[in-house]
Image (cartoon, grey):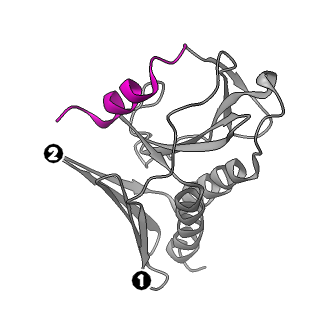
Amino acid sequence: MGRMDQAIVKGMGPLPAPVTIWIRGPAVAADDRSGPVSGLSSSPNSSVRADGQHSATFEVLGWRLELSASPGLARLVIIGIEARYTHLVDPRALAAWAIATTKLLSLRPADSARGRAAIRAPFLLDREGQPSIAFEARVSEQGVGYQMLIGGNAKPLTSLVTTGDVVRGMAQAAAGIGRVAQPSR
């Protein structure tokens, strides 16, 4: 089986190289006004499971993401076919990432072709400065579609089409786990 990002790109067709600009706050916007967003749909097999306040598990297109908290530290484990990544994350970084990711949910469909855009929240960086996951919203006149990007930075290792519910769930779980993992003062 090929990599998931290659399968998604084949289904959508080639995408033009976006121009990256900085916008207010930590989010990165990529201008992609060359055509309508097509081929993005809800992920039929996305699920979320949370057990109390200490961990949450998400499954998106065959990938499993597990967020957990321990005092002073949060852990993100990403498991896919033949892949496993473990990231130790500072609780404050996780909380800041959750806020930036939540901003994607306020996007609305474009009024015209001029409003088409791809907007990426920043990658969640682990304690070693390695990128783990990020979400991207693709805005067109037809709606807003979401992708989860795993690893990489300028070029993610994998892109998974997902839903606003998964974006919301991950952001809420990250915010809660970030609070639980904060060391007591």
Residue at position x 32%, y 31% from top? 7
Q: Which residue is mark 2?
A: 82
| Residue nearest the viewer, comparing 121 with 59 | 59
Farthest residue toward the right? 111
**Are the two marked residues, 1 and 2, in contact with CB atoms closer than 8 angstroms?**
no
Residue at position x 69%, y 53% from top? 105
Work out whether 175 lies above or below 43.
below
Work out whether 150 lies above or below 56.
above
The image quadrant that residue 6 belongs to is: top left
The image quadrant that residue 171 belongs to is: bottom right
Q: In this orientation, does residue 69 appear?
A: no
* Label of residue 175 in the image: none
Highlighted magenta segment, given as a residue range: 1-16
Work out whether 166 lies above or below 180.
above
Q: Of marks 1 and 2, which one's residue comes earlier in the chain?
A: 1
The image quadrant that residue 159 belongs to is: top left
Residue at position x 84%, y 33% from top? 111
Q: Which residue is mark 1?
A: 51
Q: Quadrant of the N terminus?
A: top left
Residue at position x 42%, y 57% from top? 44
| Residue nearest the viewer, comparing 53 with 29 | 29
